[in-house]
Image (cartoon, rainbow, N blue to C red):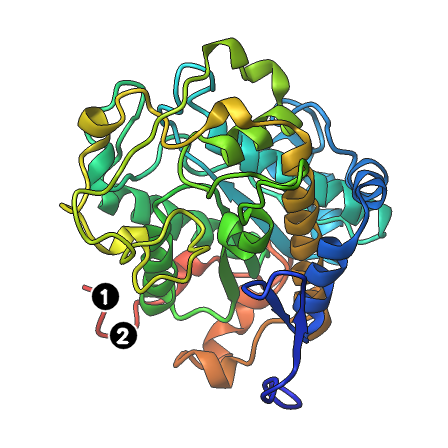
């Protein structure tokens, strides 16, 4: 149950920019601390707490569930049954950047959070990205290097990834997204609950939007981006330069100056930083397809990118994910799930065998449950 008020009027933390305010909650206070911190403190957070930059852990034993001995996976899960799942894609990000940019961004952020969790004595588990190729909005159709997977395939892959993780004892799932297919992830979460009705906590973290304040353009400051976040631009290239500089070739970077064909001021950019009436994903036909409007694969100004411009937003998202995990575990310690009586129409008696530790005496896989609800065939 949510305790206390929901931030009555006036409980806000202001900044030197009137358009940037933070709610007076644990989340808002964390963001304000990062916002006000000198760069020396940001560098300390990145280096000491999160060990950024570090090489990718996708091929390093012990980083992900899939490259860790099962005995260690079980030992870790018994203490912390949260699992973080990075989600990226394969997409043209211009000649200067790698097409797996989204995947490496989000996986390395999640790996940093794992390193911090180990230091804190509450190691979190990571699962391999379930989507090496992702779904895409219509305007990306036709771009070489962008691999477009049907929406139903994306959703089903995510639904059954969540089911398999739940069946293995990970009942708190954080899906960290780095790509413009978040509506497919939202739909997958809703369908997962409708289809299986299992007691779980699942959330989408669209990480750029979570820390949108730190991508707000401030041309007068060298450690902030000077243009609004769009695609393969100053913001994304800066993150790449911080996390995996060897995959970025700045000598190939080119800038573009796209413009909408109509309805200026109605549709926001990637992070919804302008607070416009509509998110970019809510329309098509108001701007050109990428292959015609920006065939360079870039929307913005990657030539302005520097690693320093990514430090504050990366410190903010890593701090947020750490806070989120901590608060989830505070609400539901390892081995506990949200109330069966409140979030599913299955009975406690029916679910009891499935809630035992996987492979223990009396445990039953979810594959032994009967279908339930009108959303099943």
Direction from residue 221 to residue 141 in the image, left or right: left
Image location (x, y in percent) of residue 277: 31, 65
**Contact, CB < 8 Å: mark 1 with mark 2?**
yes
Q: Look at mark 2 in the image and give the residue it sits on.
A: 373
Above or below, comparing residue 70 to residue 274 in the picture: above
Image location (x, y in percent) of residue 97: 47, 19
Image location (x, y in percent) of residue 121: 85, 52
Marker disc for residue 131 = none
Q: Which residue is drawn at 42% across and 22% down?
A: 99
Image location (x, y in percent) of residue 370: 33, 67
**In this view of the protein, which residue sits in the foreground, 285 or 373?**
285
Q: Which residue is drawn at 62% across and 41% down?
A: 220
Looking at the image, which residue sits at the far left?
285
Above or below, comparing residue 175 to residue 21 in the picture: above
Direction from residue 58 to residue 311 in the image, left or right: right
Above or below, comparing residue 356 to residue 98 in the picture: below
For disc 1, the neighbor class at 10 Å (few under 14, some 14 to 19, many from 20) is few
Q: Residue at x 49, y 54 (%)?
A: 209
Direction from residue 355 to residue 70 in the image, left or right: right
For the residue labelled by badge 2, is the local secondary structure a helix, a strand or a loop? loop
Q: Look at mark 1 in the image and give the residue it sits on.
A: 376
Q: Which residue is drawn at 40% across and 61% down?
A: 368
């Amino acid at each position: 149950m949510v305790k206390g008020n929901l931030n009555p009027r006036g409980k806000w933390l202001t900044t030197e920019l009137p358009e940037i305010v933070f709610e007076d909650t644990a989340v808002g206070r964390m963001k304000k601390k990062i916002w006000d911190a000198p760069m020396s403190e940001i560098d300390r957070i990145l280096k000491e707490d999160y060990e950024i930059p570090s090489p990718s852990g996708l091929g390093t034993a012990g980083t992900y569930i899939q490259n860790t001995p099962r005995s260690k996976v079980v030992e870790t899960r018994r203490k912390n049954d949260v699992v973080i799942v990075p989600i990226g894609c394969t997409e043209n990000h211009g000649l200067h950047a790698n097409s797996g940019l989204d995947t490496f961004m989000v996986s390395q952020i999640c790996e940093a959070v794992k390193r911090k969790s180990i230091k804190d004595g509450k190691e979190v588990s990571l699962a391999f990205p379930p989507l090496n190729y992702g779904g895409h909005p219509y305007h990306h159709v036709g771009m070489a290097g962008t691999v477009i997977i049907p929406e139903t395939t994306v959703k089903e892959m995510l639904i059954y990834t969540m089911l398999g993780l739940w069946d293995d004892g990970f009942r708190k799932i954080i899906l960290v997204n780095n790509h413009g297919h978040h509506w497919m992830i939202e739909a997958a979460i809703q369908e997962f609950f409708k289809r299986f009705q299992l007691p779980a906590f699942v959330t989408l973290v669209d990480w750029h939007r979570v820390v949108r304040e730190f991508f707000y353009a401030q041309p007068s400051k060298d450690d902030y981006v000077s243009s609004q976040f769009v695609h393969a631009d100053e913001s994304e290239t800066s993150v790449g330069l911080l996390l995996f500089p060897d995959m970025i070739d700045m000598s190939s970077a080119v800038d573009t100056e796209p413009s909408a064909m109509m309805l200026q001021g109605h549709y926001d950019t990637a992070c919804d930083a302008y607070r416009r009436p509509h998110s970019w994903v809510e329309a098509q036909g108001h701007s050109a397809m990428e292959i015609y409007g920006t065939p360079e694969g870039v929307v913005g100004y990657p030539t302005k990118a520097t690693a320093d411009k990514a430090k504050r937003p990366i410190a903010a998202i890593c701090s947020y994910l750490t806070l989120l995990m901590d608060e989830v575990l505070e609400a539901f310690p390892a081995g506990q799930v949200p109330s069966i009586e409140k979030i599913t129409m299955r009975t406690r008696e029916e679910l009891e065998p499935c809630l035992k530790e996987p492979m223990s005496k009396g445990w039953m896989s979810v594959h032994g449950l009967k279908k339930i609800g009108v959303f099943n065939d």
